[in-house]
Image (tube, coloured by chain):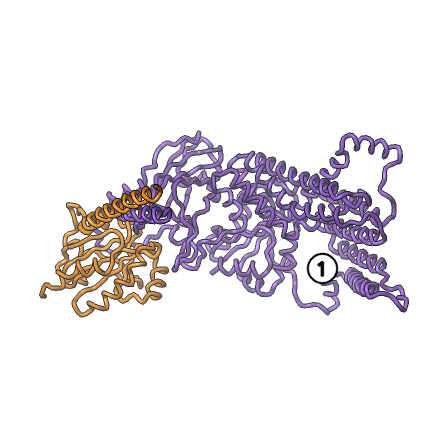
Chain colours: A purple, B orange
Amino acid sequence: MKIRWFVAAMLSIACLARAAEPVILDPAVAFKFSAKVVADSSLEVTYNIAPGYYLYREKFAFASESPNVTLGTAQIPNGKVKQDEFFGRIETLRDQIKIVIPYVRSGDAAAAWKFSATSQGCADVGVCFPPNTEEVGFNADGMVTGGGGGLAALDAAAPAPRTEAPPVVIPKTVQNVAPGSGSGEMSETDQVTQIFKSNNFWGIVAKFFGFGLLLSLTPCVLPMIPILSGLIIGEGSNVGKGRAFALSVAYVLGMAITYAIAGVIAGLSGALLSTALQNPWVLGAFALVFVLLALSMFGVYELQLPASAQSALTAKTNRLRGGKFVGVTFMGVLSALIVGPCVAAPLAGALVYLSLTRDVILGGTALFVMALGMGMPLLLVGASAGAILPRAGAWMELVKRFFGVLLLAVAIWLITPVIPSWAVMALWALLLIGLAMFLHAIDPLPDHVSGYRRLWKGVGFASLVGGIAMLIGVMSGAQDPLRPLANLGLGGQKTALHEAQFQRVKTIEELDQRLAAAKGKYVMLDFYADWCVSCKEMERFTFTDAKVQEQLKDTILLQADVTANNADDKALLQRFGLFGPPGIILFDLNGQEIKSFRVIGYQPSEKFLAALTKAQS
Amino acid sequence: MTKIRDRIALSVAMLLGVGAMYLGTTWNKDSSTQILPADLLSPGVLYATSFPDLAGKSHALGEWQGKIVVLNLWATWCGPCREEIPIMIKLQEKYRDRALTFIGLAMDDQAPVEKYAKEMGINYPILLGDITLGEFGRRLGNANGGLPYTVIIDRTGKIITTRLGGVDEKFLENALMPLLQVKT
């Protein structure tokens, strides 16, 4: 019965909607526009869309009408996606939407300025409108001084009728959605920024938790597992299930708090986040901690305080039930700092938003729950470690050694960006050879041993061969630990693009000169830093791909090395709204950025090539 | 008890629906003959107006003088416009020998229009208009530039019917019938 009532109601609503068909509002009324300066460097554009009307997300265009103001990338909320048979994926927006646009003022700060906003939409009844452009003027204090009435009125003044062929003047908005240009495409950072679109606080928080869960499936979290396991095992053999889990919680909380704080700080200061945390000395110190932890795993020493201190501490711990937790939480904090660059892309999106909205509470909370999501597998490890780990036993030693090796691997991984590549290879070689020795790779096996022993010997032998190959590689001057024998003529013919073709740019002025000189050619700008792991991955795996090189053949390759993070570097990064490398920007034949391209974070060659081909076609 | 209440509710809803449907049909009838501006384009001005075709060659609308013209203002970015194009192709085919031509005036970029026209096999002339039709649109009776907008012009250049929003086959046939019956 209820269903019938519902159907009838829907029927009448449908008829009413149909009845309203011929009443078409003027676009200026249907899409009511207003704009204001919200922070000293952001514009907020609001469209109040009448019921039954919608705007195309891809058709917005915002432009500064004054030379002293440069607009950044507009943060447009996500719309409802629908599949269009001609254009493919398109997004539509309804009700009220707010768009935030950062801007940079240069020159005369006291000057008034103007900005124009173009939008385009349709009515559900089946009528679409041409792009509607609104212009707003601001005085030096960011107060609206005029406009908002739209340019449509100017049409009335146009001479009529046209007796010549009218010039085909197509606004940029339309060119942006030419077929095949992938109007629905968004760079990874954009996608993250878009998550903030809804005004629902808890909805955003929930989305970020899910986002963290997804991130936990990436290798970024892997280095944390041995760290955490090491901490739990380091507790000794009497780790209870509950305590192991509690330790994991403490660790994950430490990580989450760090993300939240880092997010808030970056939001407030706009500082280059990861550079500060990726100082060689900081990295070196952490690596040392891991080496020490590893040594204790190998039984070189027992990680114990002097008996007197220990008993005092135990007494305290018993009273506080948290002495150890502080330490573990602190390790969580450190781990977050180290793994940060690995999740640079989502972090950048969140930070961009933070710096735009100044909504510190929302941003901080979002990053906090994102880290909690990332920590889920760690909690599982913690819970299961407590459950699985034997109270005592011989194979406990094996597990400890295994984690010892992993901890050493993490230590090498940590300092990889700041030491020469030959040293990295040498360290890996030593680790592999050491592992081989532990696995009895060259010890003769007794006649009647179990299959397991034979298997481990096999693994050890493979490790030994790998280690020896790397040592030979170091001696022959190879650069890449994954291809140690390249210089012996056994490897492929791949050559790194980096030194050969990238031209360095240092300042914005230099960049502008290069862009001006490169008119008619695509220009790719790569932000690079010595400590940036994904930059090195791009260099090693993506830029060496023959197909990628072929596609980039006629593209001018520029590179900004922002390792030093000086004022020029910061200015360059800020111009593109970046917080730090990695970031690859592509400019079209006129020197304008192709926004849909933007690569932040590592992309394997296939994905990079696809994006590049699309952007350059 | 519940059943009775449901039945009353259902009847009310039905009544509402029927009432709305009636209103809808009457309003729709009104829309087919819009209130046209006092300075509606005269045949002379209409025929003097020209637009480029996809190859960039300029055509004055006067080229089609003596034919019934269905001038359809559309764009590839306009979903409702694309829905009615198959109908126009079909009717163009049907009335080709009756001195009737559709003209698609696209408020759009050349490239997507060319691609779309090829894809759909559009069998009537396509011209490119400025995206904001402005004064020309207003004097065709299309004040806010909404699309699709269809104008039916008789053989002498007189605007007979205008329609904002989608048209169906029946609407076009009904509007064209009296014009087609006039002997030339």
Q: Nearer the viewer, residue A280 or A512?
A: A280
> Residue B104 in the image: x percent, y percent?
26, 60
- Chain of the residue under label 1: A
In this picture, residue A290 sits left or right of residue A217: right
Quadrant hosting residue B179: bottom left
Quadrant hosting residue A31: top left
Vertical placement of A263 versus A390: above or below? Answer: above
Q: Nearer the viewer, residue A416 or A558?
A: A416
Q: Quick check: can you spot residue A160?
A: no
Residue lying at 52% horizontally and 58% vertically, measured from the top left: A611
> Residue A257 in the image: x percent, y percent?
65, 37
In this picture, residue A5 sits left or right of residue A165: right
Q: Nearer the viewer, residue A479 or B126?
A: B126
Q: Which residue is mark 1?
A: A480
> Residue A177 in the image: x percent, y percent?
41, 54
Q: Quick check: can you spot residue A363?
A: yes
Vertical placement of A138 versus A603: above or below? Answer: above
For the C terminus of chain B, which image quadrant? bottom left
In this picture, residue A316 sits left or right of residue B47: right
Residue lying at 85% horizontally and 40% vertically, measured from the top left: A304
> Residue B101 in the image: x percent, y percent?
21, 64
In this picture, residue B98 sits left or right of residue A605: left
For the N terminus of chain B, which image quadrant? top left
Question: How many labels, in total?
Answer: 1
Amino acid type, mark 1: Asp
